[in-house]
Image (cartoon, helix red, strand yellow):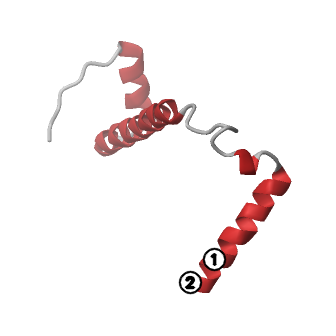
Amino acid sequence: MKTQIVLPDALAQGLKSAIPVRKRSQFIAEAIEAKLRALKFRQALKTAAGCWSDKNHSDLKNQNDINKYLARFRGRFRRNA
Protein backbone atom coordinates (compact mmCIF):
# COMPACT_ATOMS: atom_id res chain seq x y z
CA MET A 1 0.00 0.00 0.00
CA LYS A 2 1.28 3.44 -0.80
CA THR A 3 1.02 6.04 1.92
CA GLN A 4 2.10 9.63 1.88
CA ILE A 5 3.68 10.97 5.06
CA VAL A 6 5.18 14.31 5.95
CA LEU A 7 8.52 14.35 7.76
CA PRO A 8 10.37 17.26 9.32
CA ASP A 9 13.05 18.53 6.92
CA ALA A 10 15.97 17.48 9.13
CA LEU A 11 14.57 13.95 9.52
CA ALA A 12 13.95 13.60 5.77
CA GLN A 13 17.50 14.79 5.02
CA GLY A 14 18.93 12.34 7.55
CA LEU A 15 16.96 9.51 5.96
CA LYS A 16 18.11 10.49 2.47
CA SER A 17 21.75 10.71 3.49
CA ALA A 18 21.80 7.47 5.50
CA ILE A 19 19.55 5.08 3.56
CA PRO A 20 19.82 4.23 -0.15
CA VAL A 21 16.86 5.19 -2.37
CA ARG A 22 15.47 1.68 -2.86
CA LYS A 23 15.79 0.80 0.83
CA ARG A 24 13.93 3.71 2.44
CA SER A 25 10.44 2.19 2.44
CA GLN A 26 11.76 -0.98 4.05
CA PHE A 27 13.68 1.07 6.63
CA ILE A 28 10.62 3.15 7.51
CA ALA A 29 8.39 0.05 7.70
CA GLU A 30 10.84 -1.68 10.07
CA ALA A 31 11.07 1.43 12.24
CA ILE A 32 7.28 1.69 12.47
CA GLU A 33 6.99 -2.03 13.28
CA ALA A 34 9.53 -1.70 16.10
CA LYS A 35 7.78 1.36 17.51
CA LEU A 36 4.37 -0.35 17.35
CA ARG A 37 5.75 -3.45 19.13
CA ALA A 38 7.14 -1.24 21.89
CA LEU A 39 3.82 0.62 22.18
CA LYS A 40 1.87 -2.66 22.35
CA PHE A 41 4.26 -3.97 25.00
CA ARG A 42 3.87 -0.82 27.13
CA GLN A 43 0.09 -1.09 26.84
CA ALA A 44 0.24 -4.75 27.94
CA LEU A 45 2.38 -3.77 30.93
CA LYS A 46 -0.15 -1.13 31.94
CA THR A 47 -2.99 -3.64 31.61
CA ALA A 48 -1.14 -6.25 33.68
CA ALA A 49 0.02 -3.82 36.37
CA GLY A 50 -1.23 -4.90 39.77
CA CYS A 51 -2.39 -8.36 38.72
CA TRP A 52 0.19 -9.99 41.02
CA SER A 53 -0.02 -9.55 44.76
CA ASP A 54 1.31 -11.37 47.80
CA LYS A 55 -2.30 -11.72 48.95
CA ASN A 56 -3.20 -13.72 45.82
CA HIS A 57 0.06 -15.71 45.84
CA SER A 58 0.99 -16.06 49.49
CA ASP A 59 2.76 -19.34 48.69
CA LEU A 60 5.35 -17.50 46.53
CA LYS A 61 6.64 -14.74 48.79
CA ASN A 62 10.36 -15.57 48.70
CA GLN A 63 12.93 -17.27 46.50
CA ASN A 64 12.80 -20.54 48.43
CA ASP A 65 9.01 -20.74 47.91
CA ILE A 66 9.44 -19.99 44.21
CA ASN A 67 12.12 -22.69 43.83
CA LYS A 68 9.83 -25.27 45.49
CA TYR A 69 6.95 -24.29 43.21
CA LEU A 70 9.12 -24.54 40.10
CA ALA A 71 10.45 -27.96 41.14
CA ARG A 72 6.87 -29.25 41.56
CA PHE A 73 5.74 -27.67 38.29
CA ARG A 74 8.68 -29.03 36.31
CA GLY A 75 8.20 -32.47 37.83
CA ARG A 76 4.56 -32.56 36.68
CA PHE A 77 5.57 -31.33 33.24
CA ARG A 78 8.20 -34.05 32.83
CA ARG A 79 5.78 -36.78 33.92
CA ASN A 80 3.23 -35.65 31.32
CA ALA A 81 5.75 -35.46 28.47
Decide: is 27 above or below 47.
below
Secondary element at tag 1: helix
Q: Nearer the viewer, residue 64 or 44?
A: 64
Q: Residue at x 43, y 30 (%)?
A: 17
Q: Residue 22: image x %, image y %? A: 29, 45
Q: Residue 13: image x %, image y %? A: 39, 22
In the rendered image, which quarter is residue 61 located in? top right
Q: Nearer the viewer, residue 23 or 68?
A: 68
In the rendered structure, find residue 28 and report the number of the disc placed on it. none
Q: Residue at x 38, y 43 (%)?
A: 30
Spatial CA distance of label 1 from label 2 is 6 Å
In the rendered image, which quarter is residue 43 located in? top left
Q: Residue at x 75, y 69 (%)?
A: 71
Q: Which residue is mark 2?
A: 80
Secondary element at tag 2: helix
Quadrant for the N terminus in the image: top left
Q: Give the residue type at disc 1.
A: Arg
In the rendered structure, find residue 76 and report the number of the disc placed on it. 1
Q: Give the residue type at disc 2.
A: Asn
